[in-house]
Structures are given as C-alpha cells and as structure tokens.
Image: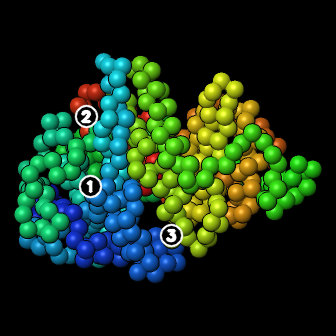
Amino acid sequence: MTKTLPSLADFAQYTIVPASDDQIRQHAKAAHVHWSHGRSLEEFLGATMREHTRESWGKDGLHEVWVLVRKDDPQGEIYSGCEVYRRNALIKRPDSDQVEDGIMYGIASVVTPIPHLKRGYATHMLRLLHYQMADPKHMPPQPSAWAAVPPYTRDATTELEPGVMPKAIGSILWSDVGFEFYEKATVGAKRPGWVVRPEQNIELVWKCLPPVTSSGAASSGSNEMDSAWEWIAETDIPEVSQYLSEQARAQLSATRTDHTVYQCDPASPGVLTWLTVRGPWLSRRKPPADEPFGVQMKNPDGSRTIVLFTGYNDHVGPRLLVTCTHNLSPEHLESLLGKLDVIAHRAGRDQGWIWGLPLDGPLVKAWKALSGRETSAGLRSEIKGHLIGVAWYGAEEDAGEFVDWQMWDWC
C-alpha cells in the first residue's frame, strides 16, 4: 500500500520545540541508526550531552536540539529533529566599510525516526525552524495552513516572547542527500531554503606518502624534515582563532560588492577546532596526547600562513582532513605536504581531503602538478558528500552571500 504524504492541512497539527531531555534521547536514538560508527547509543547520547552542557561551542544555549511534535503533545513523541549551533558571524554590507558582528546558525543531524520516514516531517520541521532563527521583518508570511504557534520554553509549559533565539543573518546546513532536498525546506511558501551552489562544494583529494627524514629515508614520523613550519598545539588555538578573525575582518572590510557578504567568525567559541576536538569522541582511532592541531609559518612580510587539520574524525570521512587554510601559496605546498604526511602516517590515513579551494586556482594546479600525489579535484558527491547549503535571512532583494566554505565551518 502506498503511503500518502501529509498535506499542509495535516501539518497544522505540528509545531517545533526545543527538546526536553527525553526528546534529546529520542533524537539521539534516531541519529544513532545512521551515524553511530560502532558506538553504543549511550556513548552517542553522551557526546550530545557533553557538548550541550560542557563544551565552549555548545554550553549556555549555543547548542540546542529542536524537534517536531504534535501541538497536543509538545513533550511527547518526536516526528523529526535536528541540532542547532549558534555561532558568531562577520557581516559586510554593500553600503559600508565596517564589518558588523552578528549571529548565524549551523544545522546538523537532521533525522526522522524510522516509523515516520518519508512523510515530509523533516522538511516541515526545517521550514518552521527558519522562523525561529530569522528576523521576522525580512521573512515572508507563513502559509496559513501551517497554523504556526510561538516557540515553547524547554519545559514546554509557557510561550516565550519573540526573540528567544537571537536573530541571524543566515544559516548553513551540510547535505548528505543531494543538491535539492534542503532547498525544498522553503522560507514561507516559495523562498528557497538551504541552497547548494556547485562552486562552494569543491573537494581536492590527494595521496599521503610515507614521511621522510632529511636524508630521504622513510621515517616513523618522529624525525621529520626540518622546515619553516611550526606545529600549532591546542593551547595555541585561542590566539590563532583571534588572528584568523582579525584577518577575516580585514578581508571583508576590503570587499566591494553590491550585496551583503558574511561568514562565520573564526573566533566563535570552539568552532575553529570543533572537528578536531569532537571527532575522537566517536572514533575508534584516538590521537596521541601531543597531537598538533595545525602548522603555521611566519612569512618575511610579517604575515602568517596557517593550516589546521585532523586525522581523527570518521564522521566527516576516513582521511586526513585539512579543515582550514589561511594565506597558503603554491610555493609552500610541497613542504606543507611533508608535514601533513607525518600526521597522516600517525593517524593511519592514506589520503588527504580539503574543501573550498577554487577549482581553477593556483593551489589546485600546484597540487595536481606534484609527482606521486595522485591528486583529483572536483564537485563533492551528492550522497555523503557534505554539501554546504546556505539559507539567507536578510532582505530577499539583497541576496546575501556566504563567503567561507572551508571544512572548519562544518557541523
């Protein structure tokens, strides 16, 4: 018997709420089916609660689970759910030289419990979520058939005043189900939801080689060749984050466009190294206690080149992940890859993966020219390719643009 999808009239019976502890568990149980990586449900739920209550990027309301529920049972069974991360944004308007501070959101772990699959619940949850994150003055009216209601507090007993979620310039969502699915989670009846643009979803994959010593012999990684690169330790990250934030502000300030441009602020609490810190929680591979978070080089002109990475995040992929690059030029590439080979060898990775490089840019060309690296570059896969989609919450005619698509933005 063919299932009939709910009509908009049916959706009028549902709303979204910030999840109770029991609903967080329901969401984790549904997500565990897809993303457990061999971990138990309790381990999986523990990771969610840890970031929700203890980690810098999640505590104090920066991380929430939102769920779709029936209006007549707001603390009961969930029909779909997702995680929402609040992050700081840097915003440059077309009529200003100033860079504003703002808010943006990252949406993750969109999942529907198996009994409720393929009935449109996830799409409707996300359509309602736009209206919690965005400034109402820029939003089209909700279709009357949705019969939307104000959000609930965590215990779902009283309605909150408007503004319970700080209003955002936009949000990002990383799709593992193709280019169009999340665009259909519209803002109102017709305005596109999370739009996936091909040029923002480029990947480069290369072969990692055994590390070598200064004599050219294979090495275990303890005596890698000396170079101008310095390891970045976890204790260095606060200063590195602030430096990258200042550089992003300067670059945005110099940008001249006829529309708003914005990006996530690298100084947002914990965000720059979210993949590095959180990855080992649910990975069978564990980094050494002294595992570096990146490398940097001080250039003659006073600038710095910075590269961040992790070899221990199976949720993104079983590769050495280059999560962030700043000011990397082709002439530094070969020496950089020597350092990355050391990290890949220790992590047991035979490939590296980087996102966000222009396909026709000099770095991609230089990478492809290196012998033995077997470099390929192109559009990421529609299935499990982690395609970034962007929803804009400013004035529709402004058509604001998200301008940093590197892996560190992922959630």
Query: Closer to the N terminus: mark 2 or mark 3?
Result: 3
- In the image, which disc is placed on residue 281? 3
Could you say whether the residue bearing mark 3 is in a helix, strand or loop? Answer: helix
Confirm or deny contact between disc 2 and disc 1 (CB under 8 A): no
Which numbered disc covers residue 394? 2
Measured as percent of width and height from the top left, residue 71 is found at 10, 67
The location of residue 78, given as percent across then percent down, is 23, 72
The local secondary structure at tag 2 comes to loop
**Viewer-closest of 225 and 67:** 225
Q: Is residue 399 left or right of residue 12?
A: right
Query: Alpha-carbon distance for marks 2 and 1?
Result: 18 Å
Along the viewing direction, whichever of 99 and 12 lies nearer the viewer: 99
Q: Secondary structure at mark 1?
A: helix
- Residue under the point 56% across and 62% down: 313
Q: Are marks 1 and 3 in contact (CB under 8 Å)?
A: no
- Among the 4 quarters of the image, the one containing residue 120: bottom left
The residue sitting at 43% across, 43% down in the picture is 267
Amino acid type for the residue under numbered disc 2: Gly
Q: What kind of residue is marked 3?
A: Trp
